[in-house]
């Protein structure tokens, strides 16, 4: 009985050791097939350049993110809308949000748009969005978008509508 247990234990240990060796050999084979990071990036950028030539995606920037591609596709399928946010200096920011977006979703999309713009153009490294939303508000047809949980549709905002980014007036 003791020798049978010992033999079973030996077989089990040998099986485990053999499985570990097989896994290590497979990992080594995978490592040999893996591309260096720089080559992988080159291939990815070539594919991305081809993809951006598509008429649907042609107005996207060269350093496009997956989020921007998904937004553009959602726009094409009617699952998203573009809200044009007008700043006081005349700049218009085309912000893409889902059809059921809230005011908070729009604010987050504005933050993301500005972050991507700064990464691409350089400039200010950090924006205090807490300060921005404390000093500015969004206005549509003379109505302030105050309730972050309220849907844009409830304010009457539709695709390609303009929302103004205005400085709040101080109370005395």
Image (tube, grey):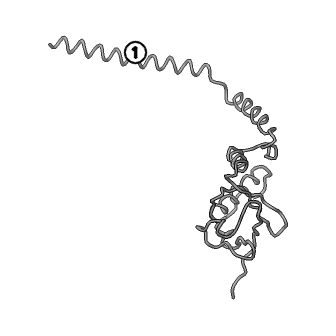
Residue 14 quadrant: top left
The N terminus, quarter of image: top left
Depicted 134 relative to depicted 100: above or below: below
**Viewed as shown, does residue 41 lie left or right of 121?**
left
Q: Is residue 97 visible?
A: yes
Q: Residue furthest right?
A: 90
Residue 133 x, y percent position in the rendering? 67, 69
Q: Please tell me in which quadrant of the rendered image residue 103 appears.
A: bottom right
Please give the name of the residue rendered at 67% of the width and 64% of the height, measured from the top-left corner. Answer: 128
In the image, residue 79 above or below residue 153: above
Query: Residue at left 78%, top 43%?
Result: 56
Q: Work out whether 1 lies above or below 95.
A: above
Q: Secondary structure at mark 1?
A: helix
Which quadrant is the C terminus positioned in?
bottom right
Residue 3 image position (x, y, % from top left):
18, 11
Residue at the far left: name it: 1
Between 98 and 119, the one lying in front of the other is 98
Is 43 placed left or right of 3 in the picture? right
x 70%, y 52%: residue? 78
Residue at which label 1 appears: 18
């Amino acid at each position: 009985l003791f020798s049978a247990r010992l033999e079973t234990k030996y077989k089990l240990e040998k099986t485990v050791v053999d499985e570990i060796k097989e896994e290590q050999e497979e990992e080594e084979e995978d490592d040999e097939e893996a591309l260096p990071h720089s080559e992988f990036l080159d291939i990815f950028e070539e594919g991305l350049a081809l993809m951006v030539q598509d008429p649907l995606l042609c107005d996207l920037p060269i350093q496009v993110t997956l989020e921007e591609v998904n937004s553009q596709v959602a726009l094409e399928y009617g699952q998203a809308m573009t809200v044009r946010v007008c700043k006081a200096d005349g700049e218009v920011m085309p912000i893409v949000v889902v059809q059921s977006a809230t005011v908070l979703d729009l604010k987050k999309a504005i933050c993301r748009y500005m972050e991507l713009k700064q990464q691409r153009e350089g400039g200010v490294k950090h924006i205090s969005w807490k300060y921005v939303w404390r000093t500015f508000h969004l206005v549509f047809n003379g109505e302030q978008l105050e309730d972050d949980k309220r849907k844009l549709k409830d304010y009457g905002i539709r695709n390609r509508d303009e929302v103004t980014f205005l400085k709040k007036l101080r109370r005395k």
